[in-house]
Amino acid sequence: MPEIKITKREIDKLKNPLKGQVFYRDKNLKGFGVYVGKTSKTYFVEKWMGGKAIRTTIGKHGPLNPVKARKKAEELLGKMSVGENPNLEKKNQVFNKVILKGAFEDFLKTRKTLKERTIYDYRRTMDGPFKSWQTKRITEISKLMVAEKHTKLGKEIGHAQANQSMRVLRAIFSFAMGKYEDGKGQQLIMANPVRVISETKAWFKVNRRESIIKEKDLSRWYQAVAGLKNNKKSSIAESVRDYLLLLLFTGLRREEAARLKWEDINFEEKILTVSDTKNHKPLILPLTDFLLHLFRKRSKDVKGDYVFPGKGVKGHIVEPGKQIKNVIEESGVQFTIHDLRRTFSTIAESLDIHPYSLKRLVNHKSGMGGDVTQGYVIHEIERLRKLMQKITNRILKLARGKSAGEVIPFPQKKSF
């Protein structure tokens, strides 16, 4: 490594190489130097520590003059002589400044399999319950802060939402514990502060929502849904109608049904395939006569890739709140979209559908550790078709009061 007297005149005379870097040592101060790249010249110090050369940059020539660079070099070399590694200090300073928002964005980058809806819900949590915390350093968020925030959220947004918000925060901190290290390679965060809620048994007790459309209400609900018609105010009413009926007759999750494309419907084999599912396990469902009737009718009227197209950026139907409100007002039956999935499962259970078969139909994972017996059950499509038809017949009988299996055109009813 060539030696020069580091002065402004000498550094200005150094030519930038076409590629790589050229290092120059100072003749007067051992360990002080400057390296020249294609476009810049940078001051540095270097010293042997623990059997290896430790080099750290001071700053670029131009914004920093040689006099100030030399003074900083003397300071750094003095610290290095007593065992202080400036690179570790820099690393500590960087990670000690990690804020919650930054950790959250890093978290999302590593979670490649998160669903669109999940990411949307996570962002709502960050922009809502934790909006005031986004600029806080993650090392500042303590157990006490978490406990107090949880209690406050319980009063402001309800127990269920408060619990869910804390689960999101817990996931971010679990990620941060594995991601960020200090200058010595130690975890930046040694303990997840959200654990305090479990340690103090402070999670709010929330009864799991078990609402369904009751059998006595199914006819009124069905008639209201079947009455949805396109008009000047709404051009998607009939799409919503078919979307809601598909959910009831299959137990699909809202996003699974909304994202269906025509390529997912095999009319010849009479099957429906959902590749992008919540548990990442493809779902193949046999189509009953009722569902075939529904899809064939839609295929004549619908253009584009999606079975249920929408006007938004996603291209498919999203959250048909207005039409659902119309159905509720017309039928007098309160319901949510997920109630339709629960209604399908409840009707299937009432028909003594075997639990393994029902899990297969609604694409549920087994419990922790899995169920060995289930692995030996062969779920042939044709056998499942009989079960699906059995469930469909029951729903039709409750909804229409007609003979089992009969496919009846949608009744003429006033438009909303």
Image (spheres, helix red, strand yellow):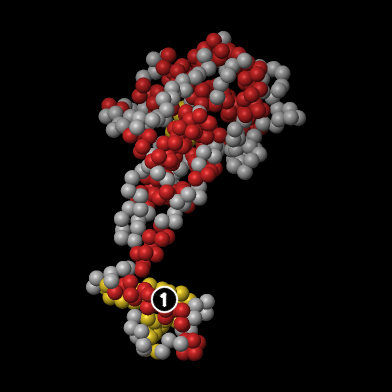
Residue at horizontal 59%, vertical 42%?
A: 314
Q: Up-down: is 182 above or below 291?
A: below
Q: Is residue 174 shown left or right of residue 291? A: left
Q: Is residue 118 visible?
A: yes
Image quarter of residue 124: top right
Viewer-side residue, 62 vs 271: 62
Q: Is residue 291 visible?
A: no
Name the element at disc 1.
Answer: helix
State the residue position of label 1. Answer: 72
Q: Is residue 218 shown left or right of residue 410? A: left
The quadrant of the picture occupied by the N terminus is bottom left
Task: State the image coordinates of residue 173 (x, y, percent, origin top left).
Answer: 39, 45
Q: Up-down: is 250 above or below 197?
A: above
**From this viewpoint, which residue is outermost toward the left?**
51
Residue at horizontal 49%, vertical 81%?
A: 65
Residue at horizontal 42%, vertical 80%?
A: 70
Task: State the image coordinates of residue 365 (x, y, percent, origin top left).
Answer: 37, 31
Disc 1: CA contacts within 10 A as few (<14), some (14-19) or many (>=20): some
- How many numbered discs sit on the rendered protein? 1
Viewer-side residue, 91 vs 297: 91
The quadrant of the picture occupied by the C terminus is top right
Task: State the image coordinates of residue 53 (x, y, percent, origin top left).
Answer: 29, 74
Q: Three-letter amino acid code at disc 1? A: Lys
Residue at horizontal 42%, vertical 28%?
A: 204
